[in-house]
Each structure stands twice: as structure tokens, then as C-alpha cells.
Image (tube, rainbow, N blue to C red):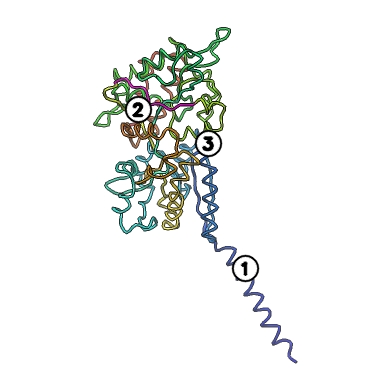
Amino acid sequence: MNHRRIAVPILVLVALLAIGATSVGAAKTTLTYWTHSHPPMVELTKKLIAEFEKENPDVKIEYTAVPNDQFFTKMLTAMSTGTGPDVFNMSATRIAAYLDSGVVMPVMPEAFGFKSEEELKNAWVPGTLGMASKNGTVYGVPSEYNVSALVINAAHFREAGLDPAKPPRTWDEVRSYAQKLTVTKNNQIVRRGFDFYYVPNFYWLDFGILMLQHKGHILDENGQCVINSQAGVDAMTMWYDMVYKDKVAGPQYSLKDSTNVMIDFARGDVSMFISYPWGLGLLQDSPVWNDTVVVPLPQMDLANPVTHCYGYYWMVNKDTRDGALAWKFVNHLASYPELWLKEVSFIQPRKGWTNTPEAKAFPYIDVWMDEMSKSTFGDMSPAWAEISSAIQRMVEKSIMNGVEPKKALDDAKKEIDAALKQ
């Protein structure tokens, strides 16, 4: 018997098996995905990624949740150096810069099961895709659409002799109620009647709400900075007076937790607080949940109510190696609006979302819907990174260091003017 003839085929077979094993191991396509950090969102995201990988065994999703106060800077650096993720979740405030620099790719309607972009546009509530569109082309779909309202602690109201069924409707009433709700011991505030978020990437929202309420804008219709207008001074002075005159608020009392910006209210350290729908997801396991009531955002002008809204959008890097796969992954994430609402308190405004059992069961859905009807995104610009940084420094100067509002606003205008000229 010629053993050599048998040995050769065996060696060939072993080699082929080895090559096959190597091919199977190397078959996976990796997509990177980045978001900001929000605990309920991160938890559901991981579940949906596991499902996607199970349905697509040849795909691996590398997910990174970046702390809120680092996310925008890290994303900007990564995208500008060509090291950005394949898929990411971006605030509407920053999208103009991404569209202006051309670093994102248009949505692929077929990845969502649509035959055309028009079909895709018709699947979302009118106006909600506009923040991620340019020249009629859509570049992202909303993962969350947020409107602002007021949350109050009903137990605190009753302790102060106030009726929680009659919450403040105006900002003057907020200040009056806050004085009655504030608790001091040994000349130190131990419970604030009302306060704002003291996390840097939320300062523009704090100030933006007051600016809208005073009928002002950061940028005029020509894109020029008017932050130090009388409306801006009045808005900033209201916040300043709550801290230094009314003594019902102040950053020195806040935990300043960028992971859970609702922590001050959740601990019972503040009686009235601005919230967004996702804020309820951070309160439902807290000691104050049973006493939490959501009411409309107070107004400066009750006859012309306005509230602030903002959103985050799923987007795809134009340099991704597989755009079709990236949008397929986004479609998977976007296919569970009921789950996002139930588990994360994220409103995803696809048509018909209000008719779902989850929407009907969502706490204070009527209030949120009413706030949506009077909401606006406010001012947006490709230079928003620089604008929001200037607002952050303005707030820190005035609210944290006692600089007069007009002076802080004038300084912010100089910074923003310089940024707009670049």
C-alpha cells in the first residue's frame, strides 16, 4: 500500500479545514456606535445590540457610551481626525456643523423598508426630521424628541401650605412659590424651592428657555449674535435674582451629576425643577416618585405660550465601510418606539406613536403632548459648539461668580461674534 498517496490528501484536508476555520473567525463585520451616557438608554441599547448581533451573526457592534460632559468634544475630535464611529447619536444643536462639514451620509430609505425618501419623510411627524435635513435631504432619524415641562414635589407643596393642584403658571409665581418652598437651617439652604440644571452641557437649555420666554434670541434672522439684547438681560437677571436676591436656588447646593441630571429633584433637595420626558425615567425608582407631578412649563406671557424642545438623531459617518449595514442597524434601533418610551421615557415621533398602549400609559402624556404643540427648537448654527461654550462661561461668570448679568452677556457676545467670523 502506498501510504504517501493517503498522507497528501489528509494534509490538504487539514489545511483546508484550518483555512475554513480562519475564514469563519474573520467573517464578522464590526460597526462602532457611540452615544452620550444616560443609564436607561444605555441599558436598552445593549439589549437591542444583542438582538441585532443574534439576527446578524456576521456583525459585531462595538458600543461606547461617553459621559455627557465629554461626548460632544470627543465626537468632534474623532470626526475631524477620521477616527469617528460608524454610527452615532447626536444632539440637534450640533447637527448643523456636521451637515456643514459633510461628514455624515444621507439616510438610506431602503434600509427602513421604504421605496423613496418621500415615504421615509412621511413616516415621521411633520417637522421632526427638519433638524437633521439639508436641502431637502434627510441625514438622520430621531432617537428622542424632548419638550420641557415643570415637575413639582406635591408633598413639599402641602408642607408649605400650597395646593399642588394649583401649580405656578407664570415665572413670577415660580419665584413666589419658591420662597415658600425653600427650607433653611442654621442660615443654610437645605431644600431649594426651584432651581436649574447645573451641568455644563445643559446651561444652554437653562438659558435658552428663559430667553424664549422673554421673546429673545441668541442669533437674529441674519445669524448675528444678539444675546445681550434687553431680552437676554431680563432672562439672565431672572436666574441671577433667584440665586442672589430671592436665595431660593444656587449651584453650590447642586450635586452637578452629569450622569443623572435629575438627581437633585430625585433626592428631594429641590421642590420644583424643569424636566423632559426622559427625566421621568430617572425618577421612577426614586423616593420622590409618588409625590412627583408634571405640569406645564411656566410662562412669561400666558397668552403666547412657548416651550423649548430639542432632540437627538441617529446618524451615520460618511466614511463607514458599509453604509447599508450601518443604516440597517439604525433601523433596528428605531424599530421599537414603544419600548423606548416604556423603558427609557424617550419619545420617538413616528406617526401613530400617540395611539400605542405605551403612549397612553405614559405618565402625564396629555401634558407632554400639549407642551409639544407649543414647542420650538430655538436658535441653531454650525458654530453651536462655540456658542454653547460661550453660554457656559457666561452662566459660570454670572450665576457662580456673581458677575452682573449685562457684563456676562456682553462678554459672551464678544466670544460668539469672534466664533461666527471664523
**Residue at position x 53%, y 39% in the image:** 40
Crowd class of label 2 (few under 14; some 14 to 19; many from 20; radius 10 Å)? many
The amino acid at mark 3 is Pro
Is 2 left, or right, of 165 in this rendering? Answer: right
Q: Quadrant of the C terminus?
A: top left
Determine whether 307 is above or below 44 in the image: above
293 falls in the magenta region: yes
- Residue on which disc 3 sits: 67
- Numbered label attached to residue 21: 1
Marked residue nearer the N-terminal end (1 or 3): 1
Q: Residue 5 in the image: x percent, y percent?
A: 69, 87
What whole-number distance in Å separates the C-alpha atoms at marks 1 and 2? 58 Å
Residue segment shown in magenta: 292-301
Marked residue nearer the N-terminal end (3 or 2): 3
Residue, far bottom:
1
Q: In front of the other: label 3 or label 2?
A: 3
- Residue on which disc 2 sits: 416
What whole-number distance in Å separates the C-alpha atoms at marks 3 and 2? 26 Å
Determine whether 141 is above or below 68 in the image: below
Viewer-side residue, 96 vs 343: 343
The amino acid at mark 2 is Ile
Q: Residue 183 in the image: x percent, y percent?
A: 52, 12
21 falls in the magenta region: no
What whole-number distance in Å separates the C-alpha atoms at marks 1 and 3? 39 Å
The amino acid at mark 1 is Ala
